[in-house]
Structure formats: structure tokens, C-alpha cells
Image (spheres, rainbow, N blue to C red):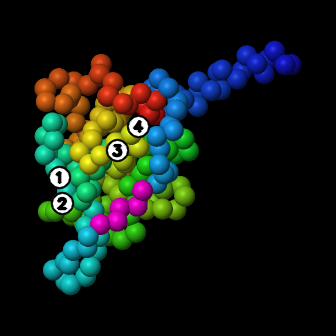
Amino acid sequence: MRRIAVLTLPFLLAAVLAACGDDDDTSSSESQSTTSTVESDTTTTATGESSAAVVKFTSSDFGDILTDTDDNTLYLFEKDTGTTSTCEAGCIEAWPPVTVTGTPTGDGIDAALGTTTRSDGTMQLTFNGHPIYYFASDSEPGDTNGQGVGDVWFVVDKEGNAVKKAAGTGGDTSTTQAAGGSGSGY
């Protein structure tokens, strides 16, 4: 019986890691929180209502990409199904969801913004139907260390698509692991 348990443990560990995508190293010690609520300046809409200004587009080596108002890069997870987030448990340590408490707004992109309810009841920002995340290893505004991690995490362009090229090139990231991204490929 003990031999079966010992032989089964590696398979269970592999199944858990595979559920979140490719992962070369499961360390997430750089994670600072499991969720990040967007807190930013407020804007006044045409009707006089105030709401949080949460996102904008910022010029980067990947073209104009989705960021929060502090220029922190935002990502999408290709394993998500529609507006349903599949990044849970250990995954959110490396990829904190962008959570909101009100109606999300952005510079001229309000129609593409929305929310989805996560399994814990929080509201996660969506852009063109994709749940949106931070990457815990991005330590400075403008960092894009999560680009291409596990071939499932990508920065987001103005149309809400995953940008699948390496920085400053027209090349595909399918064979490139992002710098500083090992261990967070969920």
C-alpha cells in the first residue's frame, strides 16, 4: 500500500501543475498578494457619475498594450474559457486577477470593458471578454516579464487579442520563455 502512495504522488503533483499550463519551477516567492484591486484616480462621466478609471493603452516594445493607470502591464490567460477565469488557487499567487469594485472605465475603451464574477465572489476586470491579470514578477511600471510565459500568458492589444510576438520583433513567442517568467507558466 505504501509503495502505491509513493508512486502516485509524482503523478498527482504533475496533474496539479499541468492544470495551470507549462511550469518549469513552481516557486512563487515573488508574489505579493493573491488579488489586486485596481485603485486609481476617478473620472466623471457625462452623466456626472464617478467611477474608477482602471485601464488605458501604453506604448511598449509590443506596440500599444493594456495597462492600469499606473502603467502596470495587464495580461490575458489563453486557458480561460470566455469570461470565466480558470486561474485559481496557486495560479493567482503568480497571476493576481485585476479586481474591481465598480464599473470599469478606460480612456475611450469603455465598451470593451466588463467584469466577471470569480469563484470567491470578487469581480474581475474583463477586456473584450477576456479576464485580465497582473504578473507578480513585474516589479516596475512598464515591466512585461509575463509575456509569453508558458505560451499561455500574453500582453493585450487594443482589439483585446493576445500579442504573440517577442518584444521589438515580428516573431512568435511560442519558443521563447519570458525573462524572469520561469516558475509562473500556469
Query: Are discs 1 and 4 less than 8 Å apart at CB?
Result: no
Residue shown at the point (38%, 55%) measured from the top left: 98
Q: Which residue is mark 1?
A: 57
Q: Is residue 121 above or below residue 157?
A: below
Query: Are discs 3 and 4 less than 8 Å apart at CB?
Result: no
Query: Are discs 2 and 1 less than 8 Å apart at CB?
Result: yes
Q: Which of marks 2 and 3 precedes in the sequence?
A: 2
Q: Is residue 41 above or below residue 169?
A: below
Count of picture labels: 4
Q: Which of marks 3 and 1 precedes in the sequence?
A: 1
The CA distance from mark 1 to mark 4 is 23 Å
Q: Which residue is mark 2?
A: 109
Mark on residue 79?
4
Q: Which of marks 1 and 2 precedes in the sequence?
A: 1
Observer-side mark, 2 or 1, equals 1
Residue 112: percent from left, percent from top? 23, 58
Residue 18: percent from left, percent from top? 52, 28
The CA distance from mark 2 to mark 4 is 24 Å
Does residue 17 appear left or right of residue 116 in this picture?
Answer: right
Which amino acid type is shown beneath numbered disc 1?
A: Phe
Observer-side mark, 1 or 4, equals 1
Dominant secondary structure (helix, strand or loop) of the stretch shown in magenta: loop
